[in-house]
Each structure stands twice: as structure tokens, then as C-alpha cells.
Amino acid sequence: MTSIAEHPAQASGIDDVPFVIAGHTFRSRLMVGTGKYRTNAEMVAAIEASGADVVTVAVRRVDLDRTREAGILHHLDPKRFFLLSNTAGCYTADEAIRYARLAREAGFNDFVKLEVIGDKETLLPDAEGLLVAARELAKDGFKVLAYTNDDLITALRLEEAGCAAVMPLASPIGSGLGLINPFSIRTIKRRLTVPVIVDAGVGTASDACITMEQGVDGILMNTALAEAQHPVRMATAMRLAVEAGRAAFLAGRMPKREVAVPSSPETGKLGG
Amino acid sequence: MTTLAITLNGDPREVPGPLTLAGLLAHLELAPETVVVEHNRRIVRRGELASQQVAAGDVVEIVHFVGGG
């Protein structure tokens, strides 16, 4: 067993390969959002407890009447966290590209979590718009992390488009339904070369653990923490679950059998 | 001193002119390093804010990062 000290970059102590996206190494395989928390203090405490170094943010108009909360950077230190801006709420490729470019101009990094949404009710991705935006942004030097369906072909096309990572959903955004199609996620992970990060749908720690057991590189979540009764406790649970799931994947699980196999020796039993 | 009618973050607004984008941010009491400015659909680098003049009828968007997933 390798000690934590030999892998100082690995926060968990699991003997693991580094988690690298577009040449940038991250400590935690758990990435978290910053939306929908009851208070900013609770958000900050939950992010601390999660151990995440990547936090997502959205681009929106400054409220010139100051009636709403000020920008997120009043609460989160951009030197401590890697700010991954998203294009949430964008319904066309052009709109997503515009948001991505505005975010980059903020000057933190050239990563973008690309979302092109196709439907208001399900918030499912628009594969066509996603591909158009991904190609354009990758050509423009962005490191694109594309939020997508759990569909292999779209994932492959996104990789071909130059995405730095592909982010298939576990289930719809904010649904908390957990990992609906482990087979699709495993297939995507097996067939892609770029990191696969499951984004959206995780509801509780077991969901995160099962997701990581599929062998994906990481998970991004927001609502599971923000809408938990106790976000800080849930953030701790998620940190442990992601580590446990990753460790179990690396350990390699036993085969499933539909018959029992005794754990104790069948030889050496007393005579009758 | 004149008044410029512009569209600012989607709403009609009158601002004192002549004015640069840097002057507009100062007028709104916004620190340039905390926002990104789009001027008539063109993103303006921070270094250019002081040299870009605001004209009547301009469309200005001022954005920042907020909580999101």
C-alpha cells in the first residue's frame, strides 16, 4: 500500500493516477457547483467540506439596483478554487459561445463547462448545438468540458470536436435520481480518451459512490449539496463516497454470481 | 455635460456624457476587475475600458460570476 506522503498531490490517500484535464492536475475528483444554497456562508462551508478544488460558476448580468446578492467572488477566493464557468441556461450554440467568451474575459482560465440546453422541462442537452459550440470554442482555444447526454455517439463526436472532457449526465439536472444508465456511462468511459466526468443527477452519497465505481474520472454536482437538509454534512458524505467509489473501482470488484459460494472451508469439518 | 440614453443590461438608462466605459463603471460604482463589459455585442478588454467612448443608443452589458452548477 502506498502512503499518502508518497502522493502529496492526491488528497484522498488512494493510490491513483493524477486527475488531469487539458494538462491541468486537480486534487479532488469531486467538483461542485455554487448555485441554490440557502446562504453564502453555507455554500462556502459545504465547498470546504467537499474537498473540491473545481467550483462552477455562472455568468449573469450585474444587478445594478443591488437588490440581489453580489457576485460570487465576494464569497469565494479565486486563488483557492479553480473557477469553472458554465453556459447554463443557453439554448443555442451562439448564446453559449457568447457566454463562454464573456467568462474567459474575467481572466481566470480558458476552461468552460459548455451547456447547450434543448428543452426547458427536462434541461436535456441539445446535441447538435453542443457540437457546433464545442467545435467553435475548441478552435478558439477554450478547454471545453461538455455537458451531454449519456449517449456514446454524441460523446465520441464531442471528443472529435476537441473537447478537453466530456460530461455525461447521471440523470437530469437537479433531479436527484442518481445514475440511471450505468451501462452507457461505462461504455462512454471505455471508448473515450479524454476524461469522463459525470455531471448532474446525483442525489445522495450512494449515487456518487456507484457512479465512481463505473470508472469515470470524476463527478460534478450542485443540487445534491445545496438542497440537502444539511449541506455541509452531505458534502462530507459526498467526498467520502467519491473516494470510496474510486477506490472500489481501482480495487476491482468480485464477480456477481447467482449462486452462493461459502466463505469458510468445506474441508476439515467434524465427522458425523 | 450632456445626457446619453443607452441600453444598460437590458433596460433604458440615462447616463451623464461624455463618458468612457471606465467612466460608466465608476458612475455605477463597479470595480472593473469584478466585471466583464460587452459594448454593442463586442467584449471589451479591461485595458480598453478607459479608451472606449459610450455613445447615445449604445447597448452595454455588464456581467459577473454568480452561483451556478
Image: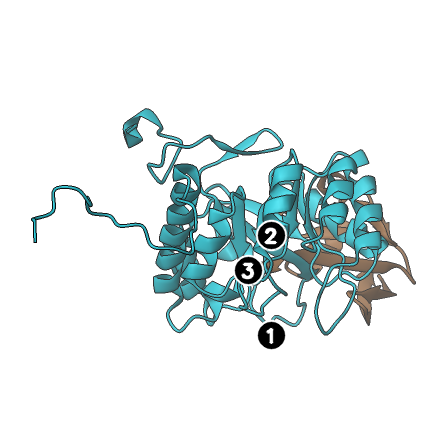
Chain colours: A cyan, B brown
Quote the CA–CA distance across marks 1 and 3.
38 Å
Mark 1 belongs to which amino acid?
Thr
Asked if residue A140 can be seen in this view, the reply is no
Task: Work out whether residue B14 can be spotted.
Answer: yes
User: Looking at the rendered structure, which numbered label has been put on residue A3?
Assistant: none
User: Whole-percent x and y of residue A107?
Assistant: 65, 41
Q: Residue furthest front?
A: A272
Q: Is residue A90 left or right of residue A185?
A: right
Classed neighbour count for the residue bearing mark 3: other residues with Cα under 10 Å, few (<14), some (14–19), many (≥20):
many
Q: Residue furthest right?
A: B57
Looking at the image, residue A254 sits to the left or right of residue A121; the answer is left
Residue type, label 3: Leu
Q: Chain of mark 1?
A: A
* Disc 2 from disc 1: Cα separation: 46 Å
Left/right of residue A6 with respect to residue A101 in the rendered view: left
> Which one is in front in this view, the residue at disc 3 or the one at disc 2?
2
User: Which image quarter is the N terminus of chain A in?
Assistant: top left
SS for callout 1:
loop
* Residue positioned 38% across, 63% down in the render: A234
Where does the image place residue A271, in percent across and percent down from the top left? Answer: 7, 49
Q: Are marks 2 and 1 in contact (CB under 8 Å)?
A: no
Give the residue at mark 2: A183
Q: Chain of mark 3?
A: A
The answer to which of marks 1 and 3 sits earlier in the sequence is: 1
Q: Give the chain of mark 2.
A: A
Q: Residue at coordinates 75% horizontally, 43% vertically from top-left?
A: A158
Question: Is B18 in front, or is A242?
Answer: A242
Q: Which mark is residue A67?
A: 1
